[in-house]
Image (cartoon, rainbow, N blue to C red):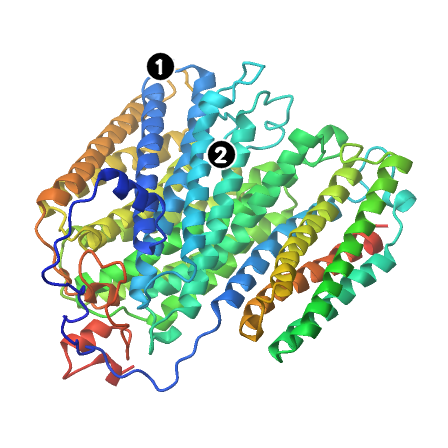
Amino acid sequence: MSAMANPFPEAPPSWSLPYRGKVAMAGLIVAESAIFTIFVVAYLFYLGKSVSGPTPREVLETPIFYTLCLLSSSLTIHLATKSLARDRVGAFVGLWLLTIALGGLFLYGTGQEWHRLIYEHGLTISTNLFGTTYYSLVGLHGFHVTAGLVMLLVVAILALAGRVRMQESCRVEVLAMYWHFVDAVWVVVFTVVYVLGR
Amino acid sequence: MSSNAITVSGVQIDEKPWVDILHEWVTTVDHKRLGVLYIGYALLFLVVGGIEAIVIRIQLMFPHNDFVSPQVFNRLFTMHGTTMIFFVAMPILFGFANYLVPLMIGARDMAFPRLNAFSFWLSALGGLLLYFSLVGANGLYGAGNAPDVGWWAYAPLTARAFSPGHSSDYWTLSLLASGFGSIGTAINIIATILCMRCPGMKLSRMPLLAWLNLVMSGMVLITITPLSAAQIMLLVDRYLGGHFFDAQAGGSAVLWMHFFWIFGHPEVYVLIIPCFAFMSEIIPVFSRKPIFGYPVMVAATVCIGFVSMSVWAHHMFTVGMSSYANSFFTITTMAVGVPTGIKIFNWLGTMWGGKIQFKTPMLFSIGFLFQFLIAGLTGIMLACAPFDWQLGSSYFVVAHFHYVIVGGILFALFAAFYYWYPKVTGRMLSETLGKWHFWLFLVGFHLTFDLMHIPGLLGMPRRIYTYEPGRGWDTLNLLISVGAFIQTIAILVFVANMVISYFKGAKAGNDPWDAWTLEWSTSSPPPAYDFASIPVVASRRPLWDLKHPEDPDSRYE
């Protein structure tokens, strides 16, 4: 094999392109936003169209505490990635586990609310339109929280095994983007279901 | 050219056993092989969907024909539509994007090769699920062996009461699976184009094919997902007793239509924009001129991307919407014609004063320009709400959208096949057979789809399985079916050409068309690593610069 002369012109002195992980996650977020938009539209369109009870006003209670849990987990994951970028692995692991705990608490809150709705008010997904749209929208969000928690746990296990170091911080930031998105969706779902929807 | 494959002399490569070759193809993450898999998979379904179309046409050839039963006819047009859109057009265009985008932007693979393989196999699973319904959907009810709800699956046809058994479930699951596959590929294309370009390839120097596929992928992210969301709702209705589309519990059948067409109309642009991309590469090369109005082409594409998101309800004029909604969707639909017209003028401007070579790819491209224009004009007619009230759900509509999909998309795809086949296989397709293919297909196409407008104007409704004699539709329907047979013969010529040329075709060399984009700088077929050394570009036509160092494009751009 002979040394080949590059037939093309000189490379420009500086050539940097965005990190593919972040671009891909941004793409996924756009796609997920469209899915959530359709479910939110269905929820709003069917508000007050149920032919039988129970209605949102009768049974829903605003989950302020659990909402605060989820929203503050955005702050902890942000601080966690910042710590990792500054090579403070101990702080990263602590904040990361705190994020998982807060997310888990939120999921527990959703479970408790569903338990109350099903066993005290007899509201299931097939009871009426409110049940159908409520469980689908909140359930879709809960599914995304669960998927996020699984991914966070994988990173936590790797971190406890000492495999997550400063070099990995840009990858961890991709996961943090997803988590911020899940939080942002909750702001919309909360507004639609618990504020506008009652 | 020195960016050829690296060859090591004195090394004998043994023939591999076929099991190893199969294993390599199944486990591949190479963008070129996945591209070929996508295209091969789509061609397989093209044959299946084509056979369904032929059976439909045999049934409609004569009045009171009973070649198939009404039930089978419903299944046929459902499967034909679903197959052609989701398992032919989408995968074939993704296949071309997969194959060409990395080569054209000077990258060695897509941004996420394993996601790429995953997306392909998801789409493949979707197609298998759809056709598995033929054996799997019988269920305890013995009802339905293939989906029969139409490719739009309007509520309440899909409700448990009206669609017992599992045929609708297979339809839903297959579209969900292939939808997730499409989203994966779209994300991959976006990440590849934004993050993997070779040094010097600024966005303003990207080949138009890459630009248009970027816009297409962006559209996929926001158009396929509403369909996935609606399919999830349908599954909730069918399996968990939900009421989304259950009118008796306050649900709305019209909401399904909105959700479906929020996907359904932009989908047409998702399919046609990559075809615009083929045109924007092929027409300049065979006119021996650079593309006319590059920045305007990009702007018009982005504009189409945005406007086409707000036109969906022109599929629903006959449902009875408010006059405000009718006016809004009429205006937006007509507005899409403006950027599309800009594109047609730009292609004509590229040809104007060029030294046009009438090779087969160029013939198909010219056919595309002419037919896509007519398809657009009948589209403008149908965009007028009052006109649509008269002709919606008639054969005029069927003629219109087949003019777009066959006359536009399929012709552009044939052009792309003839243009890039030498790169993929290293052999030229036969020009003689190519001309036979072109002229036969052109005659068959016009016989079928020009005439199909007329029974529509005479009041022949869509989706009927037979009709009364003496309404003035008889001869027309016979001729339409004859046209379909001529198209079938043309397709057989095409298949024969692909097979014969693969073994006997003239050797293509790196750059048989004297073209200007990077894929022609590497060997045909390209080596697994695409480029021996990553290229560096200084203009939109890097190979022109290379061939004409005395007068490079980079001096003027």
**Residue at point 72% right, 35% down?**
B251
Packing grade of label 1 (10 A; few <14, some 14-19, many >=20) is some
Q: Amino acid at mark 1?
A: Phe
Instruction: Judge from the rendering whether residue A67 lies leftward or rightward of residue B233; answer left or right.
Output: right
Q: In the rendered image, which residue does mark 1 sit on?
A: B67
Q: Amino acid at mark 2?
A: Trp
Placement of B200 over or under B77, stated as above or below: below
Q: Position of residue B494 (x, y in %)?
A: 19, 39
Q: In terms of image quadrants, where is residue A87?
A: bottom right
Which quarter of the rendering shows the C terminus of chain B?
bottom left
Q: Earlier in the sequence, mark 1 or mark 2?
A: 1
Determine the chain carrying the residue at label 1. Answer: B
Q: In the rendered image, which residue does mark 2 sit on?
A: B151
**Residue at point 81% right, 61% down?**
A69
Give the camera-side residue of B30 and A188.
Answer: B30
Q: Are marks 1 and 2 on the same chain?
A: yes
* Distance CA(mark 1)–CA(mark 2): 22 Å
Placement of B498 over or under B530, stated as above or below: above
SS for dot 2: loop
Give the camera-side residue of B445 and B227.
Answer: B227
Q: In terms of image quadrants, where is residue B448?
A: top left
Packing grade of label 2 (10 A; few <14, some 14-19, many >=20) is some
